[in-house]
Amino acid sequence: MPPDETAITASQILDRESQKVIREELARESVSAVRLIEHVIQHAHALQSSDIHLDPGETILASRFRVDGKLRDAHDIPMWIHREILARLKILAGLRIDEHGIPQDGRFRFFLTERVHPDSVGSSSLAAFLDIRLSIAPTYYGENAVLRLLSSRDQLNTFESLGLSSIHQTIIRRALSNPHGLLLLTGPTGSGKTSTLYAFMQYLNTRLLSIITIEDPIEYSMEGINQIQASQRSGLTFAEGLRSILRQDPNIIGIGEIRDHETASLAVHAALTGHLVLSTLHTTSAPSALPRLIDLGIEPYLIASTIQLVVAERLVRRLCTFCRVSKALTEEQRLVLTNRSGNLEISSCSYFSSIGCLRCENTGSNGRIGIFEILFVNNELRDAIARKASARELSLLAQQDGMQTLFEDGMQKAAEGLVPIDEVLTLIHE
């Protein structure tokens, strides 16, 4: 049944109320940048946004919210209060308010006035605060600001909520049970690597183990884990922090990202000397992470000796289960699937689309879910790594051992009605 176009969704009510509150604030004789920022953050949080963009223009400071991976317009704020808003954000994040020509990064904690999210399905208790990461950069019309909303509730991701299948969960638990070795999470920026990394560490987090991380930035505070903030300003790089960690007698080491030869070398040697090391790496697939380590100057025999698991990930919208409907494939989609399906029986699969309803605020989606490619390194793959096999050869060997590619995992989730097939085809390129 198509959605009732005359119905007003909870999202629309929130939009109207927020617009009204900000108009009333701007109409005051003494406009408060403090209150404006509070209203915008409260609104973004109520819509379950991951980011707030404040983009200056000639006459308007445009605010946009990223919801389920897509930006949507929120409020148009007059530019005459732009400087006050940026100054307030800098004060909150402990940044220099007299510096306008260079990028600045910081973070602060924002305390919510409400503990309940007013959605149309029901209410759920949320954290009383948000950790917010702030990035400021100079642009043509003045400084912009991007706020990443890091609600503490997001720390509690389970393997199921991430979108990992039961088979993938079994493989990951097997790898995490090793007392030493290197586990890598790969994917582009915004693909969910950090959330998955935190879920892995949360799974391992017990009083019997010492877990220490070096991160830039620390996105979520995790009780029971010692987290170190890397800082270029103070000279605490990933490599320097990792050297310090190794003197702290850890069982498990978390590295926010392997970016250079020095960090990669220290990570591999830490795994070689009896530590379980978890980190992220920017590559497009799980098999391509192994040649990437060689590109960073790591000897192939060291990689083969230490690597245990590589996980590649992408994020796609999760279809609303209340308004999803069966969808016929277009000829273009059928052609693409025929060329890329491999062993998938696409002709017998049903695919779905969401038309929008009150429960999903007429968006057709309900958050996002991960699509995964998990490479468990066996002896055959170790031999191939040691002789510098290409990413393609490693991929073929892994698939012969049962590895499900990103495309196959995405298509399986599309057939189950979890994700839209067009996003799987758009996001995953092989």
Image (tube, rainbow, N blue to C red):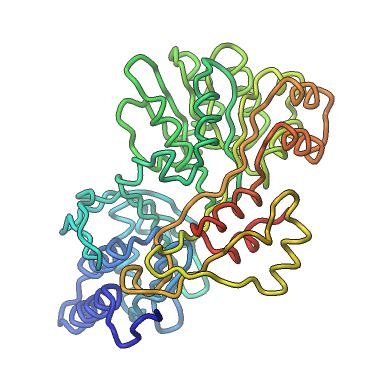
Furthest residue in direction bottom, as rendered: 6
Front-lying residue, 173 or 254? 173
Q: Residue at x 53, y 24 (%)?
A: 174
Up the image or down, 283 lies above or below 82; here it is: above
Up the image or down, 4 lies above or below 354; here it is: below
Q: Residue at x 73, y 37 (%)?
A: 399
Q: Residue at x 47, y 13 (%)?
A: 247
In x, y percent, where is residue 127? Answer: 23, 48
Q: How many marks?
A: 0
State left or right for residue 404 relative to residue 387: left
In x, y percent, where is residue 301? Answer: 76, 19
In x, y percent, where is residue 393? Answer: 82, 36
State left or right for residue 336 relative to residue 419: right
In x, y percent, where is residue 202? Answer: 38, 31
Front-lying residue, 137 or 179? 179
Up the image or down, 419 lies above or below 229; here it is: below
Quadrant of res 217: top left
Q: Residue at x 73, y 48 (%)?
A: 343
State left or right for residue 339 relative to residue 171: right
Where is the N terminus found, in terms of image quarters? bottom left
Front-lying residue, 378 or 300? 378
